[in-house]
Each structure stands twice: as structure tokens, then as C-alpha cells.
Image (cartoon, rainbow, N blue to C red):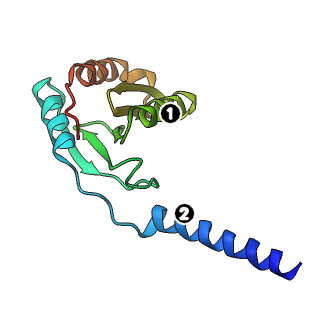
Amino acid sequence: MRYIFFATVLLFVAFGGEWFYLRYLRRVEPLGAQALALAEHFMRNGIQVQAHPRRHGFRAAQMPCVAGYALAGRPEPIVVEFCASDSRAEARLRAHSADPAVSQAARNGRLVLSLPRWSDEAAPTASAVLAAFAAFVPTEP
């Protein structure tokens, strides 16, 4: 019985330690060329954004980086996840579609865009962002 208890505690510490490391201690991945190209694409389409890296709790093999785009004059962010595979991107799109805090989500190849906490008043801006995102041609990593 004692060995089962210690094994359970060891597993809890291992998984808890990994979660804590991924969530709080791991460095924020810098923006890649594709994230910067997407920011330039938004600018060419008349959407003034400033790109910045965001912390995420995934392994690098699942999601190499997450970019946040701050719109000029708007408090709502644009979040783009750069997934490692098409199946991972599809799973993230399903997760965002089920999340009530995400008003809209879209997928373009391995990229998944979400608009968290966007109100109905921002619908024209949201539709412009979604159209520009759909027109972006992602490059393979």
C-alpha cells in the first residue's frame, strides 16, 4: 500500500511539475517569420496591428508559437496559434468553437485565429480581420 501511495505522489509531482513549467516557467517563444508576415499582411489590408508573442501552455512539438496582434484603437486582441500539424489545428479550432469566450474562430492551414471577447459592436472589424486572415497564404514551417 505504501508503494502505491508513493507512486501516486510521484506521478502527481511529475505531471504537476510539467504543467507548472509549461504554464509559468518556460520562456515565451519569439515570433517567427510567418507571424511577422501575417502582421504585414494585416497592415497591407488596412488593419493596423502590432504583433507580440504570447505565453502558451503547450509543448513546442504541438504548438511552436502563439502570436497576439493588438489592434490600433481597440482593446480586443487577435490571437493566432501556429500549430505543428493539421490535426492539431483542427482540434484547436473545435476547442475555440466550443469556448463561449471566443466570439469567432477560423483556420487557415496550420494557423488558427481566435477573437476572444469580441462584442457584436466590433462585427465590421471582425469580418475584415477574418477576410484578411482567409486571404493570407501561410508558408509551411
**How many numbered marks appear?**
2
Residue 117 in view: no
Identified by mark 2, the residue type is Trp
Element type where label 2 sits in the image: helix
Q: Nearer the viewer, residue 100 or 24?
A: 24
Q: Position of residue 17 (x, y in %)?
A: 56, 71
Residue lying furthest left:
44
Q: Residues within 10 Å of mark 2 (few under 14, many from 20)?
A: some
Task: Provide the residue designation for mark 1.
Answer: 91
**Could you tell me which residue is drawn at 52 percent across and 27 percent down?**
97
Q: Position of residue 116 (x, y in %)?
A: 44, 36
Q: Position of residue 106 (x, y in %)?
A: 39, 25
Task: Provide the residue designation for mark 2.
Answer: 19
Instruction: Compute the Cα span from label 1 to label 2.
Output: 20 Å
Give left or right: position of 78 versus 57.
left
Name the image quarter holding residue 49: top left
**Could you tell me which residue is drawn at 52 percent across and 29 percent down?**
94
**Could you tell me which residue is drawn at 17 percent across and 34 percent down?**
48
Q: Quadrant of the N terminus?
A: bottom right
Q: Residues within 10 Å of mark 1 (few under 14, many from 20)?
A: some
Name the image quarter holding residue 50: top left
Give left or right: position of 81 versus 24.
left
Element type where label 1 sits in the image: helix
Compared with 94, 58 (above or below) is below
Identified by mark 1, the residue type is Ala
Q: Position of residue 128 (x, y in %)?
A: 26, 19
Compared with 52, 134 (above or below) is above
Give whichever of discs 1 and 2 has the lower sequence position. 2
Give left or right: position of 14 versus 1.
left
